[in-house]
Image (tube, helix red, strand yellow):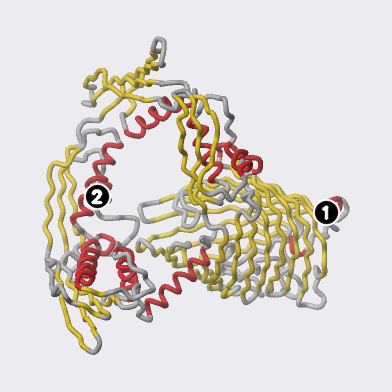
Amino acid sequence: MSPAARILIMAAGLLLAANGLSAQSNITVKGLGPLENRRLDAQLAFLLDCDPDEPVALDAALLEDSAFLLLEQLKRMGYLRPAIGARLVSGEAETAARWDAEYAIQLPADATADRVVFRIERGVLYYYDTVEVGGASALAAAEARRFFIPGGALYTRRTDRAFTLDNLDRRINRLLRTLEGMGHRTARETDRAFSADPLTGAVRVRVEVEQGPLHRVRRTEVVRVPLQGEPAVSGADAGGVPFTPDWEQQMRAALIGEAYGLGHPDARLRLEETGRATGADGSVLLDLRFTVEHGPLVTLSGIAFAGDRSVRERVLIRQAQMRTGQPLNLLEAGEARRRIMGLGVFNSVRLGFEHEDQTTRRVVFELEPGPRKNLQLLGGWGSYERARAGLRWTHRNPWGRAHQYDFGAKVSMRSSEVQLAYSIPQIFGTLTGAYINAGHAFREELSYDRSTTSVAVGAGTLVGAAGISVATEYSLKRQETERRAADAEGAGIVTVAGLTVRAALDRRDDFLTPSSGYQVHASLETASRYLGGEVNFVKLEAGISRHRSVSSSTLLHGSLRFGLVRGWDGTRGRIPFNERFFSGGENTVRGYREGRASPLDANGDEIGAEAYALANLELEQRLLPNLSAVVFVDAVGLALEGMGAGQELLYSVGLGLRYQTVVGPVRVEYGYNPEPRPQDPRATLHVSIGFPF
């Protein structure tokens, strides 16, 4: 689902909640505010297995079950002593009932109602006030407390620190698993105590653990046992590496994967401790033996597909890339399953086997169909374009070949776009996909209008395990520019044909709201008359962004981007207006409106740059788990002609607020220009959705 569609769905949910509609048409929950009321309504529909759009038969059992489920949900939220009142309506008659935390049946067995209104009485919210963890010396005290009281913000609300007996158990278990993951394999809880203030809900917790000694691996021995013949034994000094679950899992995966790769799908592995000693630092030094029993050598006798048969079998066989008559490699079978799933037309692909005899098996892929046709309504907001709306129609597997076509249309206060695309995933079973698309886009800028009609064909792939995506594309574009000023240069129509190569590497922890990692991207376009256009030029753009934590609640974001476009073969100075660079706006230099951080002509209208270098630096301070304040500096160096004449520097400083949502941050940012040009604004306010870089 697209981000804009999610926004519309969220808005519809808020509208329904605000109008008091409930999950079941004759059950209403009140007392928690529109959003929480709606959420509990939805939970009731799910837990009671009711159709959310139809009335339900309200007998005593369902009413009592509803009250009990609501009480339990409130307790899980940290309201440990809630109560629920109910108004039961039957015709003209009304009766009342009330349940509290010490649940007891309140209704007679023959009670019924036409509709019911539950009113929540939450009571006091119980929350972690102070937490002391003793015995976990491998963790800093503040780090141990983080398992119970979340960090990452200047202020943590009580609702984020809600206390229940269940979440106390979960938090202690996570603490113990963390110690285990560090090599303290015998870590255990020895005592716990807590006291709660019934008036304020403040809970004071003390937990005692015994983390035990650090376990290290002194030596490993591997015994490979074939079905026939003598075992092969090898050993190695492990150098005292911590004996953690991750290390053990890696060893197991490597050894069992080796056996699978040789055609032994029934291979089994045992781990034994063959010796131990105490190190000078008190750690436990272990000698470990891994025994791999290969089992029989199995041959792949065939491949079969079950379930959804809408995709042609030869397409699936080509994706599987498994050869019959060869040893059955479970790792290859797993890769085949992922390639088939990568076609994008199945909800799931399950891997199974049919045993023909002890030494031959057939692989069976169980295919569960995914949605074939999908209509999405799109919506959004930006400071320049204002409201945006549109739709996207997707049809997957139209001809039984796992292809896909998309039609999209978007319109805003200043732009419109229509796009049609046809894509082919994983050509010939590789990671390479191909596409062809065509479209028309119009955009109204401050001092000019521009439109582009284009057709493009391209292909993209991932480069090995590096995670680098590479794509190449041929495009043919008809670009039209209309300038506001009568004497302005750059107006007219031009045809551009070019080859573009793009590459990107994304190592961010989250592409919507990154807090660590980096991203690198670059593109190179060569436009030429020999390719069918009217102009010759080379256009290069590249950039890198970096994100890191300064503290548990403070983040630093930085980005460097640059671009250069140059004419060649006698067309220097004839760079198409639409191919020049226009900085400014919510994602570049935020003291300016969209495209206004650009070189200007004598009329004060932007004319674009042939080269730019853009830097963004942000310091983000989380105030609440979902709310941040941002201080930023944006600067761009511009060159009117290549990297030479007409150079100028524009920069902005500013403040902003960001609220994190499922579609990315909602941003309100104010950019101030300390040294504006005569035509520039002193400051600009932006409202937008999405991370700026």
In the current view of this chain or complex, which residue is farthest to the right? 570
Image quadrant in which the C terminus is located: bottom right
Q: Amino acid at mark 1?
A: Asn
Q: Which x, y percent locates residue 673?
A: 57, 69
- Mark 2 element type: helix
Q: Amino acid at mark 2?
A: Arg
Numbered mark located on residue 371 in the image: none
Does residue 646 appear in the picture of this structure? no
Which residue does the image show at 56% across and 66% down from the upper left? 375
Q: CA distance from mark 1 to mark 2?
A: 63 Å
Whether residues under marks 1 and 2 lie with C-beta atoms below 8 angstroms apart, the answer is: no
Pointer 2: residues within 10 angstroms few (<14), some, or many (20+)? some
Which residue does the image show at 60% across and 74% down from the upper left? 681
Which residue does the image show at 26% across and 50% down from the upper left? 147
Q: Which x, y percent locates residue 526?
A: 77, 50
Is 221 left, or right, of 562 in this rendering? left
Residue denoted by label 2 = 171
Which residue does the image show at 11% across and 57% down from the upper left? 195
Residue denoted by label 1 = 536
Asked if 428 appears above or below 655 in the picture, the reply is above
Q: Which x, y percent locates residue 404?
A: 63, 55
